[in-house]
Every structure is written in C-alpha cells, then in structure tokens.
Amino acid sequence: MARMGSHAVPRFYSSEPLFGGVAPEVMEASLLRLAAENERYLSELPGQAGCCKDCRTVEFIFLLAEKWHLDHSARYQAVELLERFMIKQVEQVCKSPTENMEGTKGGSSWSSLKEQIYDTFVLRLVSCIQLASKLSLHYNIVNSNTALKFLQSLKYSYTKQELLESELAVLETLQFQINVSTPLAYIELLLEVLGHNGCLLPAKPLHQMCVQLLDFLYLEREAIYNTLLKTAIENSTPSELQEAKFLAVKEDFMLLAVGIISTSAFVLNPEHWKQVVEHLNCITGITSQSILEFSYAVLKHVLGSTTPKQQRRK
C-alpha cells in the first residue's frame, strides 16, 4: 500500500493508496506496531483528550485543508496535532501555577496566559496544518507565504518570523514527536489485511466510503459517540463515571477504524457485511458486538438506519 502525489501534480500521481502490494510479514509487523501505539496512547490518555475535536475546529481545519488542496491524511494529521499540542500547552501552563504567577498580582498572570492561548489559537491551528502538509509526503506543502496570506485575510498582523516561531513552538511542545498515526492509517492497513485474507469487497470503493464516513465522524464526533455510549450501557442517561470511563473508547483508533470499515461495508454491500465483521474480529480481537454497536451509532446519524441494532442482540 503506497501513497503518491496530490491534486496539483501530474496526472499519473494519485492521492489514493494502492492496495495489494504489501508482503504478509510487513502487514503483520505494521499491524502490531499500530496496535502497540494505540494501546500506549490509551494507557497514557490525558483527561482533556478530545477537547479540541469540537465540530467548529474540525470543520475549520477541513475547509482550510480543502482550500490548500491537501489530502485526507493531512487533514486528520492536523486535527490530531492540534489536539495534542493544545493539551500539552494547557498542561504546561497548569503544571506550576505558583511559578507562573510569581511576582504578579494573584490571578492576573494566569488570566494573561489563558488570553495568550486563546489569542494564538488560529495561528497554532495554521501551524499544525503546515506541519501536517509536510508530513503527508505530497507536493502540496503549505508554505509561509500561503499561510501568512490567509492569516492576513482574517485581519491578523503576524509576520513571517512569528509564523516560523509558531511552527517551532508546536514542534518543541510536542518534543518533535509529530508523526502520529491517524485513524486513516489504521483503516488503510486493515483494508490491506482484509484483501489479503480474502474479503469479497474490493478495497478501492470500500476505502472511498471509509474516507467519507471518517470525515462525517470527525464532524459529528460528540453526537455519534454519545449514541454509542447509550447503546453500550443500554441507558439514555449515562452517569459521570460512565462518561469518564468512556473516554478511552472515544480515543481508541483501532475501534474507530474497524467501526468505519464495518459501516462502509454495510452501506456498500449488506450481503457481505457479516463476513467483513468476522474478518475484523479475527484481525483485531475487537468483539463483533462492539463493531456492531459502533456501526449502529454511525448509521443512526448518517442514514437513520436501525438495521445493525436490530441484528445486534439475540
């Protein structure tokens, strides 16, 4: 599976992955690596996880990525980078409040720090998109001139030097660990494995549907996961404790990937849906029940369909 080119490059390039060319041992090693990365992130999950994945922020990033002709992997990467950066930044500010306010009148310093975070949010968002464009291995890199022109159109008066310093601030805050795997990477690898294991659905249309549904999920994240929580606990009013424990479910990229693939298979070809769910269960160890519940939550918001829910319990 390989990615090549983007919209602005010659026609023999394609932003879509090529399936069917990965050796089994490479697939296995990649799957184990992603699973370990996912488990490691969930084990260290900060309590603020998901705080910057609200609909308005995600839509802003998606629209900018589209304006700058970035592929889907870059837009998801930008969302995840901004999320992790903002959490780290808030953690740093909150880590030692007495030091931050030393020599000042009480909470005035804390208030100014909060204002600084708020005032630089759009700048940091643009920096995350710039960094994501450089990571996506495509020719459409968002350079300083492009980013600066956009910021100036919003009446911001940043200089090129401030833009470069903003990129560096994101890099340093994240300790230069910015090449994080996105849910799309999980989806594409699982599609490769499904094809190798004899899945009857062709990978290309399945991938296209997965991308559309993943976009939708990012934009309707809270509503979909609220439905998933209520379905899982069979209660329309979850407690605070249940909501807190559910945070790990909301941040589980492997579950997200299998749920999106399962939902895509149902939309494209319901006859082969059960086979896809069985394959995903065997590959990831995620129960068929969990996959079914995820598909129901997504489909409820996309189509208003209750078919998976009707089949999910005997």
Image (spheres, rainbow, N blue to C red):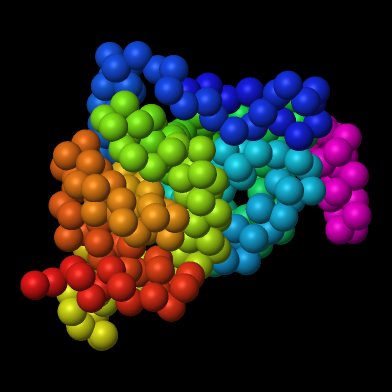
User: Seen in the image, is 105 located left or right of residue 152?
Assistant: left
Nearer to us in this view, 236 or 258? 258
The residue at the point 20 percent across, 70 percent down is: 311
Does the magenta stretch mainly form a helix, a strand or a loop? helix
Q: Is residue 68 above or below residue 314?
A: above
Q: Position of residue 3 (x, y in %)?
A: 57, 25
**Residue 6, quarter of picture:** top right
Residue 175, percent across and down? Answer: 49, 29
Please name whichever residue, 159 or 233, is drawn nearer the observer in this view of the structure: 233
Range of magenta residues: 144-165
User: How many numbered discs sit on the rendered protein?
Assistant: 0
Classify 236 as above or below 172: below
Q: Is residue 127 left or right of residue 158?
A: left
Residue at 53% x, 61% y: name it. 216
Q: Nearer the viewer, residue 166 or 52?
A: 52
In this picture, is 178 found above or below 236? above
75 is within the stretch colored magenta: no
